[in-house]
Image (cartoon, grey):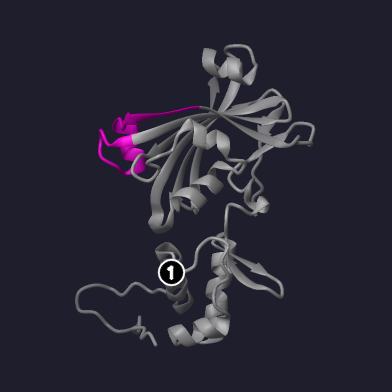
Amino acid sequence: MLKFHSMNRPSTNHSPTFSPLYRQISRLITRSLESGEWGPGDVIPSESELAARFGVSQGTVRKAIDEMASENLLVRRQGKGTFVATHNDPRSFFRFLRIAANDGELEPLRSIPLECWRAKAGVDVARTLAIETGAPIIIVRRLLRFGDEPAVFDEIYLPGELFHDLTLDILKSGETSLYSLFESRYGVRMIRADERLRAVSADRVSAELLQVAEGSPLLLVERVTFTYGDKPVEWRRGFYSTQNFHYHNELG
């Protein structure tokens, strides 16, 4: 049984930082996910088992799981239990892809890997991925198509140490999403992402790939994706065609 120190104990040096008990439990469960005790797609112990393990009430565990489910770390399935979220779940394919067709209908999605090569991290990549300048990285270029229509041209930067044997052949051989591949082959699960958007003009390369005129308006979506422990593991620069698509994010 774990013991939790009172958050109301006076301190002579610093004011105590209040952390609700259910959030402490949430952090402990997350550590178990990070350590691999329960992998993607695995069912976790029941609320009563976790309550006994951590020495707290079942209601506290339920609140922790509710929060983790809202953060897409866990998935509740009625009558089956609570499972570790996985990118292999088709329902997660569009979790990080905020794109919609202007006419409201999206054709089936296809991911087309174009290039994959090794390089050394420059200053911007090193800062974004929290690695040393000059550290090995892998750069991936791929095209997303909806049906026959190109929609997004991605340039993706990855830490070389985490994706050591990634090649274009590996990318082409998989029928799953990139994040599914990263999760299943390299044990790297994408937990959350920060995105920044700005308008840009299509250069020669992006115009050719997206089948638009050079100088056409594109939406540049820069994404930094994090795994457990808030560790950045991907920097992605996606050039979105605005010809028949738009960025869509439902709030609230």
The amino acid on which the numbered mark 1 sits, given as a three-letter code, is Ser
| Magenta highlight on residue 139 | no
Residue 175 horizontal/vertical position (percent): 62, 41
Q: Which residue does the image show at 44% across and 83% down from the upper left?
A: 54
Please identify the quadrant where the N terminus is shown. Answer: bottom left
Closer to us: 246 or 36: 36
Residue 41 in the image: above or below residue 220: below
Please identify the quadrant where the C terminus is shown. Answer: bottom right
The boundaries of the magenta stretch are: 115-136
| Magenta highlight on residue 116 | yes
Position of 173 with respect to 122 (left or right) is right
Would residue 228 be visible to someone looking at this image? yes
Position of 92 with respect to 159 (left or right) is right
The image quarter containing residue 132 is top left
Residue 226 horizontal/vertical position (percent): 44, 50
The image quarter containing residue 167 is top left
Would residue 203 be visible to someone looking at this image? no
Position of 89 with respect to 122 (left or right) is right
Closer to us: 42 or 224: 42
Residue 127 horizontal/vertical position (percent): 31, 39
Residue at the far left in the pictured view? 13
Residue 214 horizontal/vertical position (percent): 58, 11
The image quarter containing residue 157 is top left
* Secondary structure found at label 1: helix
